[in-house]
C-alpha cells in the first residue's frame, strides 16, 4: 500500500512541476521575444524489493523552444527584432553580459539605451548612451544613427552599434531572470551576420491554444493522482477493519 501511495504522490508532484512550467509559458504568451520552456515526463524504476515493472513518473526539462516568434510591424523607430538566428547583448542586474530577443528599446532619462525590461543594451564598448536627437534610426547591422537637434534631416550621425551575437544554442542556458548566458560563463563574440528588422518586434513563440489544452490535461492528470492517493487510503482503512474483525 505504501508503494501505491509513493507512486501516486510522486506522480502528483511531477505533474505540479510540469504545470508550473506550462503556466510560466502561458503567462509569457505576450512577452516580446520570449522562448517557451520544454518539459517531458520520463518513467523511472522504483528502487527496492518488488516487481521490476513498477515505475513512477519524473518531469524532465528539455531546455527551451528554439523556434522564432512571429514578427509584427510597429512602425516605431526604436523597435527592433532579430531577423533569423541571433541575440541582442544586454547587461544583467549584476553588470554582466547576457542575451535576449526582446528588442523593444527605449532611452531612459539619463540617455541610456535600454529594452522594455530595463536592461541596458550593450554596444561594442559597453552600455550605449544616446545623444539628444530629433530622429533615431537602427540599421540592419545594429548601427544606431541620430539626427542631432537643430540639424537638417540629412545630417545623420552614427553614434553606436548594438552588439549582436549568435552562439550555438547548446552553449546557452536561461537564467531565472529570463536572460540567456553562455554555460561556461564566457562572453559570446559579436557576429556581423546577425540582422535586425527595424520598426518591428518578435512575439513570444508560445502557442497559447496548445498551452491551455496542456493546462487542462495536466489538471486532470493531477486529479487522477489525488484520487489514487484517496483510494489507497480507503483500501488501508478497509484492510485495517478486516484485520480487527479477524
Image (cartoon, grey):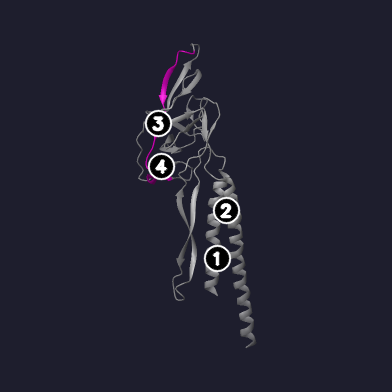
**Which of the marked residues, 3 or 2, is nearer the chain's N terminus?**
3
Structural distance between the alpha carbons of marks 4 and 1: 35 Å
**Which of the marked residues, 1 or 3, is nearer the chain's N terminus?**
1
Position of the N terminus by quadrant: bottom right
> Where is 213 relative to 233, above or below?
above
Structural distance between the alpha carbons of marks 1 and 3: 48 Å
Q: Residue at x 57, y 46 (%)?
A: 26
Residue at image mark 1: 9
Position of the C terminus by quadrant: bottom right
Asked whether 119 falls inside the magenta stretch, the response is no
Q: Quadrant of residue 237?
A: bottom right
For residue 214, which numbered disc appears in the image? 2
Question: Which mark is in front, 3 or 2?
Answer: 2
In magenta, the rendered stretch is 153-173
Density class for disc 2 (Cα within 10 Å; few <14, some 14-19, many ≥20) is: some
Residue at image mark 4: 181
**Which of the marked residues, 2 or 1, is nearer the chain's N terminus?**
1
Asked whether 170 falls inside the magenta stretch, the response is yes
Density class for disc 4 (Cα within 10 Å; few <14, some 14-19, many ≥20) is: many
Structural distance between the alpha carbons of marks 3 and 4: 14 Å
Disc 1 element: helix
Residue at image mark 3: 163
Which of the pair 34/1 is nearer the observer?
34
Residue 227 rendering spot, x and y as whole percentages: 62, 67
**Which of the marked residues, 4 or 1, is nearer the chain's N terminus?**
1
Residue 131 rendering spot, x and y as whole percentages: 46, 20
Q: Residue furthest bottom?
A: 246
Amino acid at each position: 500500500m505504501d508503494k501505491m501511495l509513493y507512486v501516486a504522490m510522486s506522480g502528483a508532484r511531477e505533474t505540479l512541476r510540469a504545470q508550473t512550467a506550462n503556466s510560466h509559458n502561458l503567462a509569457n504568451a505576450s512577452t516580446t521575444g520570449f522562448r517557451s520552456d520544454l518539459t517531458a515526463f520520463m518513467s523511472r524504476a522504483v528502487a527496492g524489493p518488488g516487481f521490476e515493472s513498477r515505475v513512477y513518473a519524473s518531469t524532465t526539462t528539455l531546455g527551451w523552444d528554439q523556434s522564432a516568434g512571429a514578427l509584427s510591424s510597429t512602425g516605431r523607430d526604436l523597435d527592433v527584432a532579430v531577423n533569423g538566428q541571433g541575440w541582442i547583448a544586454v547587461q544583467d542586474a549584476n553588470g554582466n553580459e547576457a542575451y535576449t530577443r526582446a528588442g523593444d528599446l527605449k532611452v531612459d532619462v539619463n540617455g541610456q539605451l535600454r529594452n522594455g525590461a530595463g536592461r541596458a543594451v550593450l554596444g561594442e564598448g559597453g552600455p550605449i548612451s544616446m545623444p539628444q536627437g530629433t530622429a533615431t534610426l537602427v540599421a540592419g547591422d545594429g548601427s544606431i544613427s541620430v539626427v542631432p537637434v537643430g540639424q537638417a534631416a540629412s545630417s545623420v550621425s552614427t553614434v553606436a552599434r548594438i552588439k549582436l551575437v549568435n552562439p550555438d544554442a547548446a552553449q546557452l542556458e536561461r537564467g531565472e531572470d529570463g536572460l540567456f548566458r553562455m554555460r561556461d560563463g564566457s562572453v559570446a563574440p559579436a557576429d556581423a551576420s546577425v540582422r535586425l528588422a527595424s520598426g518591428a518586434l518578435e512575439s513570444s513563440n508560445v502557442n497559447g491554444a496548445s498551452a491551455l489544452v496542456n493546462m487542462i490535461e495536466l489538471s486532470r492528470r493531477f486529479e487522477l493522482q489525488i484520487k489514487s492517493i484517496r483510494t489507497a487510503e480507503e483500501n488501508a482503512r478497509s484492510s485495517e477493519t478486516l484485520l480487527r474483525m479477524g
